Image (spheres, grey):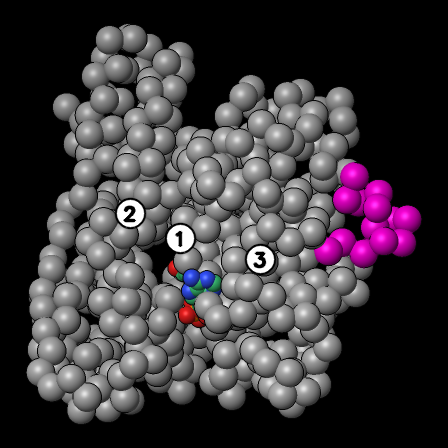
Amino acid sequence: MESQETRSLIEEVMEDLSQRQGFLGIEDEEKRHYVCSSAKEILKTTDKIIKSYIRVSTEKNGLMRIPAYRVQHNNISGFYKGGIRFSEFVNEEEVENLAILMTLKNALHRLPFGGAKGGVHVDPRKFSEKELNLISKKYVQRFARDIGPNHDIPAPDLGTNERIVDWMVGEYKTIHPGQVYLGSFTGKSVENGGAKGRRESTGKGTFLSYSWLLQEWAQNNSEDEIVNRGAQWETVNRLLEQEKQGTPIRVAVQGFGNVGSVAASEAYQYEKLNHQVVAVSDRFTTLYHPNGLDIGKLTAYTKKGRDLPANSEQLTEAGIEADIMQVKDVLTIDTDVLILAAVENQLVVENMREVKAKILVEGANAPISREADEYFEDNGKVVIPDILANAGGVIVSYLEWKQSRVTELYSEEDILSDMSAQMIQTLKAVYDAYFSSVENTMRFTCFSLSLERLAGLLYRQGKLY
Ligand code: NAD
């Protein structure tokens, strides 16, 4: 989804909320419309966009000036929070869209954070470790006044990891001697004050958003309660029936990084329902096997910092049997479930009709365009949107930030069970609302629950007069 699509959905949902009798406790229709239109104006726009050029002296290209961003969308529900992305596709519009989605995600999951995002226009694979270290430190120097444990708390995202975050924390500490620094970033290594289980949390949460729908929600609700979602209800139940009859549920995963590899492992190891991960992909290849891939072996192979095996020698080395396909084939492969865990705008009007999966899960941010989302909805597919599905990371980030304030270490078990409990609370609220709603997408339901909270906070804090 592009930022314009996110904004127009905010407009539509606020319009819908404004027509709700008694919304925000306001009975007078004219006043309610005024207040909602003020909330719309605030949430459609961004508090602050900071762009800077990082200067780095590189071995191959000499001196380079690299565009870097920090976008702070809104902090009505708490300190700004959002990852920093290193990618050659980073641009202002993308970072702003991701910042808006962070505000909505944090509000949907009732986390005490607002929304922000950062980005550096680099392909990290083309820089040496020393150069990446310099870029990371320079990023903190440039944005030092705008980040901090009580203001704006970054984390890793696409192309960044705990190593980069550790460097950034080190630089933050150097710039602010004597000040509290551990809570300035989340996603640190455990040795450096990070939360155990943070790396796995987004992938685990993504799989949970799907498995809980089948295993818990669908089993505990009956058809009589599903007023308006007959097609989606049927989709879920057909898969459950197929599995009961002995045919495993087939899963394909786009992206085999932090989020995708963990989500694939979760599906591979899931004991309550039988799954086969028939396809995985990364930016160079798609691997396919109709009887399922050995995700344990693929994870072991890629753990050494490598991409997925992309030729027959590499497949032999990994001990994997698979067909090598084109990168984009993963999107249209014959599968039941497709987990999108790579980048934005993967399923769009040009390819939406070729998608065979019946359940689509957005581990990545914004991988499905608005038009494709509506098309899937009309065709009885279930789309579990990003702000619902991929919140495991920011929930654990919240626990990490809390841990740094009480200087106490939580166990991995406690962290992952707190994350699941918090996710399940939101999953239940969304699935209950979506399956009994009239005609909108699940994304509309998520935006609605989120904007209801944000508008409520803006109103109570006196911002809408
Ligand atoms: P990552 O860098 O660890 O992995 C990204 C994976 O996607 C890699 O396997 C890469 O090869 C693949 N990829 C990149 N471009 C691709 C393309 N054009 N086509 C196919 N595959 C491609 O990143 P990550 O942390 O796993 O993040 C993946 C997505 O999840 C991003 O959209 C990110 O914003 C989102 N996300 C991440 C977290 C987190 O905690 N890491 C939290 C919420 C959302």
The yes-or-no answer for disc 1 within 8 Å of ligand 1 is: yes
Q: Where's residue 141, x and y in %?
A: 11, 75
* Amino acid residing under circle 3: Asp
33 horizontally vs 140: left or right? right
Q: Quadrant of ligand 1?
A: bottom left
Mark 1 near mark 2, Cβ–Cβ under 8 Å?
Answer: yes
* Amino acid residing under circle 2: Asn
Q: Earlier in the sequence, mark 1 or mark 3?
A: 3
Give me the residue at 60% from left, 44% from top.
355
Residue range (magenta) = 238-250
Q: Earlier in the sequence, mark 1 or mark 2?
A: 2
Q: Where's residue 90, x and y in %?
A: 26, 61
Q: For the residues marked 1 and 2, what is the alpha-carbon distance in whole angstroms?
A: 11 Å
Quickly name the residue at label 2. Answer: 97
Which disc number belongs to residue 344? 1
Instruction: State the SS at label 2.
Output: helix
Quickly name the residue at label 3. Answer: 329
Which of discs 2 and 3 lies nearer the camera? The answer is 3
Crowding at label 3, few (<14), some or many (≥20) Cα neighbours within 10 Å?
some
* Amino acid residing under circle 1: Glu
Give me the residue at 56% from left, 78% from top.
310
